[in-house]
Amino acid sequence: MKQLTELAFFTEDVEEMVAFYRTFLGADPAAQSDDMAIFMVGSTKIFIHRNYSPTEGELPPEDHIAFTIEDVDAECKKLTEKGITIEVEPQDYYWGRSAYLRAPDGQLIELIQEDKK
């Protein structure tokens, strides 16, 4: 089962986005630094990131939605067998194991492996 867990937005002005979501949601961020903020809406994060210039091998800063799944490698295999192209194959990142694909209109979708602690 896929669980929508994150809406990620990249911006040049984190403070302005934080002010907007603080007013819109009527809540303070659950976490915040100069380069990011996280608002919680139920169990879903609105993750605001400062825009950056990616270095080689680094993911580009692109707005996306993220779904948590049990096994990212198995899910990518199933999706590939159904004709869906995986744009960034499963890899380990500092936040966990993820893969990326695109919806037909170009929206980026992240698959995040469920923490198995």
Image: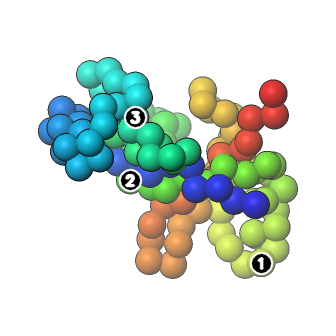
User: Does the residue at mark 1 contact the one at mark 2 (Cβ under 8 Å)?
Assistant: no
Per the image, the residue denoted by label 3 is 38
Per the image, the residue denoted by label 1 is 82
Amino acid under disc 1: Lys
The residue drawn where x is 77% and y is 78% is 82
Name the image quarter holding the C terminus.
Answer: top right
Q: CA distance from mark 1 to mark 2?
A: 25 Å
Q: Return the residue nearer the eye: 53 or 17.
A: 17
Q: Position of residue 38 (x, y in %)?
A: 40, 34
Q: Return the residue nearer the eye: 8 or 19.
A: 19
Q: How many labels sit on residues? A: 3
Question: Regarding mark 3 in the picture, which secondary structure is present there?
Answer: strand
Q: Earlier in the sequence, mark 1 or mark 3?
A: 3
User: Does the residue at mark 3 contact the one at mark 2 (Cβ under 8 Å)?
Assistant: no
The quarter of the picture where residue 20 lies is top left
Per the image, the residue denoted by label 2 is 63
Amino acid under disc 2: Asp
Amino acid under disc 3: Ile
**In-image side of 32 versus 83 (left or right):** left
Q: CA distance from mark 3 to mark 2?
A: 14 Å
* Residue 80 seen in this snapshot: yes
The residue drawn where x is 66% and y is 49% is 68
